[in-house]
Amino acid sequence: MAAQAPREPSLATTSRRFSQRSELTTEESLPPENRSAPRRKLSQKQKSMSSGLSTGGYLSPWPHYTSGQTILYNRKPCSVDWQPQKSVQQEKSLGITKPRYLEQLENYLRKELLLLDLSTDSAEELRLQPYREIFEFFIEDFKTYKPLLSSIKNAYEGLLAHQREKIRTLEPLKAKLVTVNEECSERILAMRAEDKSEISVLKKEKMDLLKLIDKKNEEKVSLQTEVFKLRKNLAEEYLRYLSERDARKILLADLNELRYQREDMSLAQAPGTWGEDPVKLTLALKMARQDLTRTQMELNTMKANFGDVVPRRDFEMQEKINKDLQEQLESLRADYEEVCKEHEILLQLHMGTLKERDQFYNELQEIQRTSTPRPDWAKCEEIVSGGQPRWLILAEGKNSDQLVDVLLDEIGEGLLRQKTFFQGLGYGSDVPSCLRFDGVVENKKSSRKEVLLLIRDFWKARLAEDKRESFSDSFFNFLDRRFETSEAMAWAYTIYEYVKLNRSNEVMIQFYATLVGKCSENVYLRHQETVAQLQKEMMSADQQNEGMLTMEQLNSILKSTFPLKKDEKIQELMEAAGWNAKSDISDSFKYSILFTEDEEGQSTLFVQKIWEQYMNEKAEYLEEFKQELGLELTSAVTPFMVREALMNIDPSLEKQALDTLVSQIFRISVSEMTESEGREEEKEISVNAALEYLQAMDVVRMGPREQDPAAKATGLSSLDV
């Protein structure tokens, strides 16, 4: 039989109880200065409410009177004798409306909401008051549910009082914020005014300098014009003087000829000439004829030799022109050879570009043929918990592959929360000791933040231990100390399943690899020690203790901490710290932000780059080791072969560290390895097994491949086995 619903009280009783509480409730919800006016209004409301609700003198029992007809008989719908039957009363109940008491309460609520003055500061408190009054009716009238309803009301009233008190404490801060905002605005306006005046002065100086430059340019053009005219006049005067010189020489030759003719005539007319000796005259005539013949021969020789000779001034002028042309020819020839070389280089670049274009075109065709459209990552905003803001934080600076990892983490986290239990992995030797359990284990359904906090606390506890226990046993003992013994296994499986599905958080990835034995815990410890050493070096370089360093100081710290890294690797770390080609090396930055973590436990790009370079250097080291062996992965190697290969690729490796490393690879003691060296019973393992063991260990280079005296003296790095 259905339970009987509580009897509803009369409207008169409800009205009296409402009139006793409404004034007190209204005054408590309003500030002191606004309590008098609502009190008068509430007294009027109580009268109208009591008169309105008392009409009829009874409360409708809706929907109590229908409870008797809603009893479900204990029969299966699929049985033979079961037939859906409808009584007359049930058919009538389908058309029954709401009871009068409920309708009157709703009408009262609507009227109260319409009468409220929502223009005051306490509009929200006034709007809440009618609902508080209706809720008081239910608390007082329904005795059965009064304790539960009273506790609900007290909880909400306490929360509202707490929020009001918090708002009152924040009001002075709001006023202070407005004052500071006004002061900053005034300072900005003043600085803008100063900058505006300086800019106007500089603009004026610029215009004056431009005018001066134009004036100087005009003077330069006029001077060049005058120089050109003077050169032209000088050339004309030079030619005129040359013509006058030649005319003067010709005139002097004519004058000499006339003088010689006059002297001959004077000698011929002189008395006593005819009285000379004929023999003497004949001899003189003969000598004169010989001189004439010789002179004629010399003249013919001169004409033959120098008939085509130009004047000296023409020769000098042509020689000067020839020299200038020769210089121009040599300059043009050098330019031509340089252009030819550039042309050949451009042809080679063009051919290479054509090959790259054809290659890229073929790759593009292949990608267009085989690739799928790029995913619309905005669709993930509705699936990820936290919505668009959290997805934007998770997707910032990540490529498609990394976004897939993030999405898989979110999906895996959702699937883990849906599971109630985990199946135990058993007691196999390949199962970590902290997970050896056969049966069902409870899922604690922890969040990512809780898992990260437990992992970090465990690493801190692990650093403080003496490491006599194995990593898995130490982790289980840590959980046993943190939680109850019965819950330690459940927490171990919860954390294991969580980190196994994680693909984006490096802390969880490193913890999972260490827990399942794929990586040594010394790898994580070395990474933490490297980060701590960098922080210490930066704090030591910050002599002013201001928390700021320059990029030049960061460069020197990185080179001293990582002496074996190349300049390209150092530049990558500086770029991860915020440096770029356009930045000045003397720019300062806050170095503490390089070691912060976000809410998801993700490290900064600087710390991630250090870890990425460590893994890449380790991979290069193992590749060199593999090439030095020169064997297939399935081939067998002895301790002697491994020792020789490690010494060749890393000559700075100390003998003790080398022997320890080789003994751990072959899982024998150093003495056993030394005794069996060179014998037939020497232990052998495959190259692949040696590489896998080195991959799991913390192996780094101690010095350069080619050993030099400087590297021997410094001892550049270390090996932690």
Image (cartoon, rainbow, N blue to C red):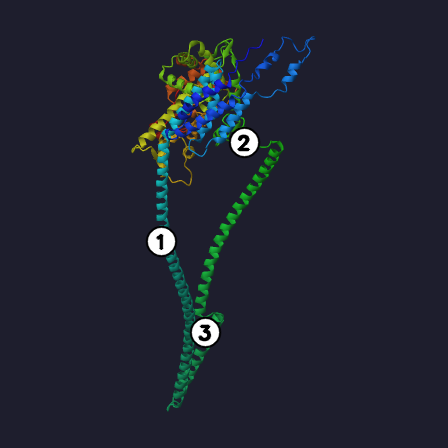
The quadrant of the picture occupied by the N terminus is top right
> As shown in the figure, which amino acid type bears the numbered disc 2?
Ala
Residue at which label 2 appears: 378
* Residue 201: numbered disc: 1
Nearest to the observer: residue 234 or residue 597: 597
Measured Cα–Cα span from mark 1 to mark 3: 86 Å
Coordinates of residue 613 in the picture (x, y in percent): 44, 28
* Residue 298: numbered disc: 3
**Residue sitting at x 42%, y 22%:** 157
> As shown in the figure, which amino acid type bears the numbered disc 1?
Val
- Report if the CB atoms under discs 2 and 3 are less than 8 Å apart: no
Q: Counting residues from the N terminus, which is met first, the one under dot 1 or under dot 3?
A: 1
Q: Helix, strand, or loop for circle 2?
A: helix
> As shown in the figure, which amino acid type bears the numbered disc 3?
Glu
CA neighbours of label 1 inside 10 A, class few (<14), some (14 to 19), many (20+) = few
Which residue lies most toward the left here? 544
Q: Is residue 534 left or right of residue 393?
A: left
Look at the image and tell me whether residue 622 can be seen: no
Coordinates of residue 457 in the picture (x, y in percent): 39, 19
Q: Counting residues from the N terminus, which is met first, the one under dot 2 or under dot 3?
A: 3
Coordinates of residue 416 in the picture (x, y in percent): 51, 18
